[in-house]
Amino acid sequence: MAGTLPGLLWLGFILSGLLGLGRTFVVEHENDCWEALLLAPGDKSAIYVGKLAGNLLLMLAVEAILVVLFGLFFNLDLAGVLPGLAVVIVLGTVAFAAVGTLFAAMTAQVRARELLFPVLLLPVQAPVLLATVKATEAVLLGEPLGSVAHWLKLLAAADVVYVAVGVLTFDFVLEG
Amino acid sequence: MVRVVGGVTLAALAAGLVMGFGVAPREATQGNVQRIMYLHVPSVWVAYLAFAVVLAASIAYLARRAEAADRLAHASAEVGVLFTGLTIATGSIWGKPTWGTWWTWDARLTSVSILFVMYLGYLLLRGMIEDRERGARYAAVLGIVAAFNIPLVHFSVYWWRTLHQPPSLMKPGPGTMPGIIVAALLVNFVAFSLLYVYFVAKRVGLLRREAEAAL
């Protein structure tokens, strides 16, 4: 059972994240506000950072609730491992939301949005999912964060790469 | 021009087959099964080459907005997916008699299959957006994200697997291979690279004519 718990936890995070992230730009699309986004003064990447921050807050809030319920239902004492768990979850969520926000903008106007969005996002997120699940596994077993330093470095690198690519390319996504 | 490349490619492929199946000696431990390496290793090389071209063409498209760059990225991604598929298929055929299984979650197998799915998604995105110009822009962004993701995939899968089990058998270090095998492999590398150029040139030409016909 202990081997599957980290995967279960992240499955919950990912499914809730897919639902939330996929709707990032649906409001603009449904209410015909896409032009308003295009007309917004200033750098377009500010819109990306804003949307990313909103998605991050939402995902982290859902994850906080899920972690509490997870500890409750699987009868785990999470108090001791909470700081380490928080580090892993925040690093992983930033990476997930950074690509998710970018892809949500790209799929918002596609008819089969709900199909295309996870098909694009999940393979790209394979390294992040591997790293988070492996790091979560170690943290839940009570190992120090130092033992999963390579995974945390990979997640940090992914965060930097994804956010940088998102900021740099969002201009092109939001053109029309 | 394209026709000349096609002719040279055909000759090179024939030479590669002769080298791989005729000239190169039968491998001592694996037997004739090992000869699939002459198709497998050049395939994966072409796949990585193709995805590198997708990255370069995507950046070029976003910077210059030249439709030629978009067509090059599109064609190269299609050929790359084809050769990634060939890599997985030839690897499976080799793995069945050698490892006793068609598929195992080895580090290299996993990272190549993630690449395969990632670029299938790229082609899907292109197919699903009706507006040509927007499709080109989105595909370029995805082409950049996917390319930057390749090292992350590589490292994560490597740590995930190889911390637990020894590296895969398929590591033909140049020092351990006899010269004749290296020569056969090199001929096939050249042949497959030419084949890549030929396929991409053909596909770019077709895409250009499609765009002209749509006007």
Image: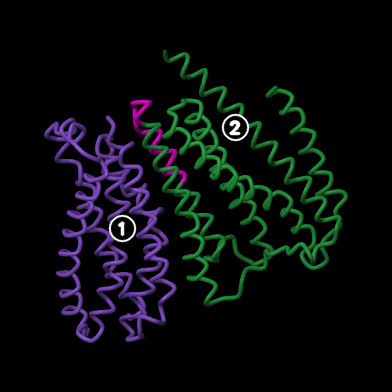
Task: Give me the C-alpha separation between circle 2 and circle 1.
Answer: 33 Å
Badge 1 crowding class, 10 Å Cα cut-off, few under 14, some 14 to 19, many 20 or more, is many
Q: Residue at x 46, y 49 (%)?
A: B117
Q: State the image coordinates of residue B102 (x, y, percent, origin top left).
A: 59, 60
Q: Secondary structure at mark 1?
A: helix
Left or right: A100 in relation to A20 = right
| The one of A106 and B21 positioned closer to us in this rendering | A106
Residue B150 lies, with reference to residue A173, above or below; the image says below
> Which image quarter: residue B37?
bottom right
Q: State the image coordinates of residue B160 (x, y, percent, origin top left).
A: 48, 70
What color was chain B assigned in the picture? green
Residue A155 lies, with reference to residue B56, above or below; the image says below
Residue A10 lies, with reference to residue B127, above or below; the image says below
Magenta span main SS: helix
State if disc 1 and disc 2 touch (CB < 8 Å): no
Are tags 2 and 1 found on a single chain? no
Q: Of the residues shown, which amino acid type is indicated by label 2?
A: Val
Q: State the image coordinates of residue B200 (x, y, percent, origin top left).
A: 59, 32
Q: Residue at x 31, y 42 (%)?
A: A170
Badge 2 crowding class, 10 Å Cα cut-off, few under 14, some 14 to 19, many 20 or more, is many
Q: Residue at x 30, y 44 (%)?
A: A115
Q: Residue at x 74, y 33 (%)?
A: B9
Say if the magenta span includes residue A9.
no
Residue marked by disc 1: A96
What range is drawn magenta here?
A: B119-134
Say if the magenta span includes residue B132.
yes
The chain holding disc 2 is B
Q: Residue furthest front?
A: A42
Q: Of the residues shown, which amino acid type is indicated by label 1?
A: Phe
Q: Quadrant of the N terminus of chain B?
A: top right
Question: Which numbered marker is on residue B200?
Answer: 2
